[in-house]
Image (tube, grey):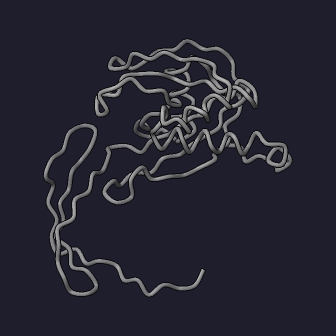
């Protein structure tokens, strides 16, 4: 990639507008490279997150369904959640898989590192394919009521196409799972963690 001439913005001041155990809202006064100034708001979650695509086999994924207060609806998605303090992304993936879907994985493959909304969120997500699953006891958080269902991967992808699965973590994870389950992708050596 060629070098860029794009210049960074200069922070003139910063203040915390709101904070709670899950996030901090910050408002900065910044100067743009052209000399103009503006305010800029950012949300920083307390912890980064993981998403897990649990594959019972190359053609079957385990989806979870739960109520999402921010959307005011029940959604289908892949297991996901925040990292706990001192927890690695892989450890968080195993815990979320067990808590939300009732499985544990013998192998995890990191397939994407993402930011949920680069314009105003300061977070990093790790998305894993989870394979070699075995049944485990699901133990949801006290704020979660979760159902899980083995689903043909093609049906989950159709749900994405019909806008029934709309969160970016699930969409990215399922699209990558589709690519990884193709015969060409299976010839490439897997990256394991």
Residue at x 47% of width, y 21% of height: 65
In-image side of 9 versus 113 (left or right): left
Q: Quarter holding the C terminus? A: top right
Q: Quarter holding the N terminus? A: bottom right
Residue 172's spot in the image, x, y percent? 56, 45
Residue 131's spot in the image, x, y percent? 71, 30
Residue at x 29% of width, y 33% of height: 70
In-image side of 72 versus 184 (left or right): left
The one of 95 and 117 positioned closer to us in this rendering: 117
Residue found at the very far top of the displayed protein: 137
Q: Is residue 144 above or below residue 171?
A: above
Q: Is residue 123 above or below residue 154?
A: below
Residue 181's spot in the image, x, y percent? 76, 39
The one of 159 and 184 positioned closer to us in this rendering: 159
Q: Is residue 28 above or below residue 110?
A: below
The one of 192 and 181 positioned closer to us in this rendering: 181
Residue at x 50% of width, y 28% of height: 96
Residue 36's spot in the image, x, y percent? 19, 82
């Amino acid at each position: 990639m060629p070098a860029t001439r794009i210049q960074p913005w200069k922070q003139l001041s910063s203040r915390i507008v709101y904070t709670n155990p899950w996030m901090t809202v910050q408002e900065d006064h910044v100067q743009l490279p052209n000399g103009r100034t503006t305010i800029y708001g950012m949300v920083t979650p307390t912890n980064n997150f993981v998403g897990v695509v649990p594959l019972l086999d190359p053609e079957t994924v385990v989806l979870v369904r739960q109520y999402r207060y921010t959307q005011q609806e029940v959604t289908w998605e892949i297991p996901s959640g925040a990292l706990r303090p001192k927890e690695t992304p892989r450890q968080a993936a195993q815990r979320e898989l067990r808590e939300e879907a009732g499985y544990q994985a013998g192998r995890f493959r990191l397939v994407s590192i993402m930011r949920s909304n680069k314009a105003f969120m300061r977070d990093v997500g790790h998305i894993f394919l989870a394979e070699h699953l075995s049944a485990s006891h699901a133990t949801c958080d006290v704020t979660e009521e979760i159902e899980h269902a083995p689903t043909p991967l093609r049906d989950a992808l159709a749900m994405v196409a019909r806008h029934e699965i709309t969160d970016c973590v699930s969409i990215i994870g399922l699209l990558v799972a589709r690519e990884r389950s193709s015969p060409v992708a299976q010839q490439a050596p897997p990256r394991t963690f």
